[in-house]
Image: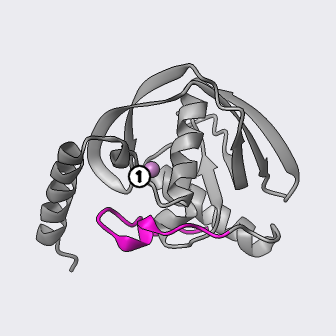
Amino acid sequence: MAVKQILTEPNKFLRQISKPVEKVGDEERKLMDDMLDTMYAAPGIGLAAIQIGIPKRIIVMDISRDENKKEPLYFVNPVIKNKNENKSRYEEGCLSVPDQFAEIERPKTCEVEYLDYYGKKQILKAEGLLATCIQHEIDHLEGILFIDYLSKLKKSMIIKKLSKFKSKRIIV
Ligand code: NI
């Protein structure tokens, strides 16, 4: 298990479309373990493989926000079905868009078909924070970030801020 570096916007890698996983094997499980470590260390409640530079359709999440009672979720090749017409709004952030937050509207509930940690097919009915989080993460697999839902002006302001921050950053 290892903590990996999280890519941040602007970064072309984050905009690429991730590829489906053919089989959930040891390599994929190792990746999911590393992703979970990386997510907990950040700390965050969701992470897509592309955020650590691996273009595979894999997501990890834990929305329990309880140090003592971890409830990790693993989604391989997740597909959203039956989006609700009702919307909910959450103030979203993203480990790849550090220190930026914005209220985003998304379907309130959805069903997700996916393979679990052992490659078994599962269906999850999600609502509230879980539904929002899974939709945010699946967006990552399509190269979409939450700032893409904002106005052009707001989005470019955020990207400008992030670029400035990046240019000042030194790693020694
Ligand atoms: Ni994100």
Q: Which residue corresponds to the image point at 67% horizontal and 39% vertical from the top-left?
A: 71
Task: Give left or right: position of 136 versus 130.
Answer: left
Tell me where residue 35 appears, x and y as whole percent: 57, 61
Secondary element type, mark 1: loop
Vertical position of residue 76 compared to residue 126: above or below: below
How packed mark 1 is, by other alpha carbons closer than 10 Å (few <14, some 14-19, many 20 or more), is many
Tell me where residue 102 appears, x and y as whole percent: 30, 35
Task: Give left or right: position of 87 versus 126.
Answer: left
Vertical position of residue 82 compared to residue 51: above or below: above
Q: Which residue corresponds to the image point at 37% horizontal and 72% vertical from the top-left?
A: 12
Tell me where residue 26 appears, x and y as whole percent: 79, 72
In the rendered image, which quarter contains the N terminus? Answer: bottom right
- Report the number of discs: 1
Q: Residue 10 in magenta?
A: yes
Q: Which residues are magenta?
A: 1-19
Q: Which residue corresponds to the image point at 56% horizontal and 41% vertical from the top-left?
A: 135
Q: What residue is pinned by disc 1?
A: 145
Q: Is mark 1 within 8 Å of ligand 1?
A: yes
- Is residue 3 in view from this perspective? no
- Is residue 2 in view from this perspective? yes
Magenta part, dominant SS: loop
Tell me where residue 119 appears, x and y as whole percent: 85, 59
In the rendered image, which quarter contains the C terminus? Answer: bottom left
Query: Which amino acid does the dot numbered 1 rest on?
Result: Leu
Q: Nearer the viewer, residue 129 or 17?
A: 17
